[in-house]
Image (cartoon, rainbow, N blue to C red):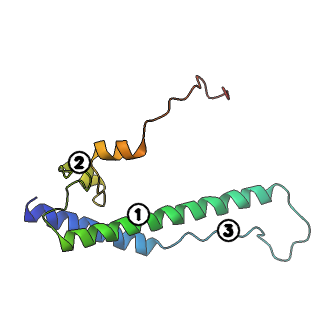
Amino acid sequence: MDAGALERHRQHLLALKAEILAAGDIAPEGARRDATAVGNDEDAQPLAEMSQSIASSRNKNRAGTLGRVVAALARLEEDPESFGLCVECEEPIADKRLGLMPYVDLCVECQQAKDGPRHKSGRKHLRDFR
């Protein structure tokens, strides 16, 4: 990979890192909206729990992506000649894939092998719960 492409990827990674850090964690909503309210709203509790679960999941995914971005920046600094090569098969990762996700370290084929085969759903309609 030429020096210009490496610098573009480095700038993209730094921008992603700054964007993730600037966004910060999503604060989970509390179960009670009004601390002075008396009684229980049975409909609000499941919604609050779902909101907390979604916020927690987003924070976990954001932290994972940040870790991958930091690791990619370290790979780029330590060994720029191997940046953009799959860590499994050492083949070049497609430019389109690196352009979209400059923190990836596997090519499409190795990523698919790692993820395993996709399971075909037996559902034919949205309302088919078998």
Q: Of marks 1 and 3, which one's residue comes earlier in the chain? A: 3
Amino acid at dot 2: Lys
Q: Nearer the viewer, residue 96 or 106?
A: 106
The residue at 91%/71% (across/down) is 38
Amino acid at dot 3: Glu
Q: Which mark is residue 65?
A: 1
Mark 3 neighbour density, 10 Å: few (under 14) some (14–19) many (20 or more): some
Q: Position of residue 36 (x, y in %)?
A: 85, 77
The residue at 54%/29% (across/down) is 121
Q: Of marks 2 and 1, which one's residue comes earlier in the chain? A: 1
The residue at 38%/47% (across/down) is 114
Image position of 75 (left or right of 25): left
Mark 1 neighbour density, 10 Å: few (under 14) some (14–19) many (20 or more): some
Q: Which residue is mark 3?
A: 29
The residue at 20%/73% (across/down) is 77
Q: Position of residue 123 (x, y in %)?
A: 59, 26
Q: CA distance from mark 2 to mark 1?
A: 18 Å
Q: Of marks 2 and 3, which one's residue comes earlier in the chain? A: 3
Q: Nearer the viewer, residue 76 or 23?
A: 76
Image position of 19 (left or right of 129): left
Element at label 1? helix
